């Protein structure tokens, strides 16, 4: 009689523990997805604020560098690129961990090194600009952010 009772109690404890682990792992995945969405929304909000002022190369470079460090602190990696039109120039930022070719109207212009932000002159006819995963047609300010780790990959762009 004692062996049967001990067996039932042990089995119930194991079932409860397994159920708890399954519930916790499902809850953890949902919170990670929300975390990535919040990080991306935070980037968008900060990006809009940065470009509402008159941005400089140093401002955008520091902003992207700090944001990469922030994302890394949340156990994610990120690739970011920007094309920002100002009244005097076009600011191009490449934080994609690879060197990217800058294409203007389909023609090669130059290579922008990884983790670099530069400025080029704004011309009337430079409406089609392509840098890594950023593609700009017209006067819109563009950002592309790819947040990923070994479990997930999420891409946000405007």
Image (cartoon, rainbow, N blue to C red):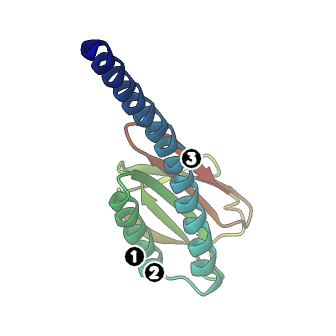
| Residue 85 shows in this picture | yes
- Left or right of 139? Residue 96 is left
Label 3 vs 1, first from the N-terminus: 1
- The image quadrant of residue 22 is top left
The N terminus appears in which quarter of the rendering?
top left
Label 2 vs 3, first from the N-terminus: 2
SS under mark 2: helix
Do the CB atoms of the residues marked 2 and 3 lie less than 8 Å apart?
no
The residues tagged by marks 2 and 1 sit, at their Cα atoms, a distance apart of: 5 Å
SS under mark 3: strand
The location of residue 67, given as percent across then percent down, is 42, 67
Which residue is farthest front? 1
The residues tagged by marks 2 and 3 sit, at their Cα atoms, a distance apart of: 23 Å
Q: List the residue tagged with mark 1.
A: 62
Q: Which of label 3 and label 1 is nearer to you?
A: 3
The location of residue 132, given as percent across then percent down, is 50, 48
The location of residue 81, given as percent across then percent down, is 50, 58
Which residue is farthest bottom? 53
- The image quadrant of residue 118 is bottom left
The residues tagged by marks 3 and 1 sit, at their Cα atoms, a distance apart of: 21 Å
- The image quadrant of residue 21 is top left
The location of residue 114, given as percent across then percent down, is 35, 56
Do the CB atoms of the residues marked 2 and 1 lie less than 8 Å apart?
yes
SS under mark 1: helix
Q: List the residue tagged with mark 2.
A: 59
| Residue 133 shows in this picture | no
Q: How many marks?
A: 3
Q: List the residue tagged with mark 3.
A: 155
């Amino acid at each position: 009689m004692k062996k049967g009772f001990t067996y039932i109690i042990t089995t119930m404890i194991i079932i409860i523990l397994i159920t708890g682990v399954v519930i916790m792992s499902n809850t953890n995945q949902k919170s990670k997805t929300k975390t990535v969405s919040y990080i991306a929304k935070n980037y968008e909000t900060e990006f809009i604020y940065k470009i509402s002022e008159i941005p400089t190369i140093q401002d955008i470079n520091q902003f992207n560098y700090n944001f990469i460090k922030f994302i890394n602190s949340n156990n994610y990696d990120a690739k970011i690129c920007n094309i920002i039109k100002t009244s005097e120039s076009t600011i191009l930022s490449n934080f994609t961990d690879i060197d990217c070719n800058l294409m203007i109207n389909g023609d090669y212009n130059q290579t922008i090194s990884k983790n670099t932000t530069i400025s080029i002159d704004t011309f009337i006819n430079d409406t089609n600009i392509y840098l890594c995963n950023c593609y700009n047609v017209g006067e819109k300010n563009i950002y592309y952010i790819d947040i990923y780790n070994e479990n997930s990959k999420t891409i946000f762009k405007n």
